[in-house]
């Protein structure tokens, strides 16, 4: 996936919002909570996306794909950074983005969580 495809997929999730806290970085949120951080390439880093995960899945993905590594930005156990170099298949990356969204939604109040989960299930 390209950064544009990552952004498009993330914004296609229910009630996703997009914000730019600074140059070269885009945050994707649901109910005000970050589920993805898209970072442009810079002098010291390639294009990448940082996604929430559970610790066990995070470790498994790091073992499976060399371009998946612990996050620099957040608690390492719960976040992975994926270098967008094409080595993670697009469908796998889409699953990772959706799972990150789901992990954030799981921590929301019950009524909000249930409403968002219904919206996800009824997506075209």
Image (cartoon, grey):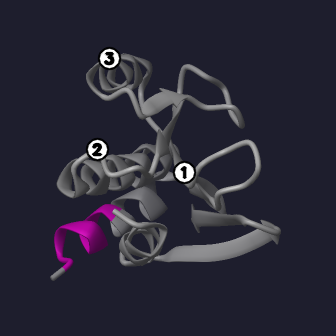
What is the number of the mark on residue 48?
1
Q: Please state the horizontal and vertical placement of residue 38, each as a whole percent of the image.
A: 59, 59
Q: Residue at x 33, y 55 (%)?
A: 98
Which of marks 1 and 2 precedes in the sequence?
1
Q: Please state the horizontal and vertical placement of residue 16, each as a whole percent of the image.
A: 50, 73
- Outermost residue toward the bottom? 124
**Tag 3–tag 2 contact (CB < 8 Å):** no
Pointer 2: what residue? 88
The quarter of the rendered structure image containing the N terminus is: bottom left
On the question of residue 54 being in view, the answer is yes
The quarter of the rendered structure image containing the C terminus is: bottom left
Q: CA distance from mark 2 to mark 1?
A: 12 Å
Left or right of residue 51, residue 1 in this image: left
Which stretch did the figure color magenta? 117-123
**Residue 86 is covered by the magenta coloring:** no
In depth, the one of 71 and 52 nearer the eye is: 71
Q: Residue at x 63, y 56 (%)?
A: 33
Q: Please state the horizontal and vertical placement of residue 18, each as a whole percent of the image.
A: 62, 75
Pointer 3: what residue? 63
- Outermost residue toward the front? 43
On the question of residue 31 being in view, the answer is no
Q: Secondary structure at mark 1?
A: strand
Predominant SS along the magenta part = helix
Mark 2: few/some/many CA within 10 Å (<14, 14-19, 20+) = some
In depth, the one of 92 and 113 nearer the eye is: 92
**Tag 2–tag 1 contact (CB < 8 Å):** no
**Tag 1–tag 3 contact (CB < 8 Å):** no
Which of marks 3 and 1 precedes in the sequence?
1
Mark 3: few/some/many CA within 10 Å (<14, 14-19, 20+) = few
Left or right of residue 2, residue 19 in this image: right
Q: Residue at x 48, y 44 (%)?
A: 83
């Amino acid at each position: 996936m390209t950064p544009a495809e990552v952004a498009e997929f993330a914004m296609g999730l229910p009630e996703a919002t997009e914000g730019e806290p600074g140059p070269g970085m885009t945050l994707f949120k649901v109910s005000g909570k970050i589920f993805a951080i898209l970072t442009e390439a810079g002098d010291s880093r390639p294009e990448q996306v940082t996604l929430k995960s559970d610790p066990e899945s995070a470790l498994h993905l790091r073992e499976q794909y060399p371009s998946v590594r612990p996050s620099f930005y957040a608690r390492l156990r719960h976040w992975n950074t994926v270098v967008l170099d094409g080595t993670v298949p697009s469908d796998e990356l889409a699953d990772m983005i959706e799972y990150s969204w789901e992990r954030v939604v799981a921590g929301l109040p019950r009524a909000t969580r249930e409403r968002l989960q219904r919206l996800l299930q009824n997506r075209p």
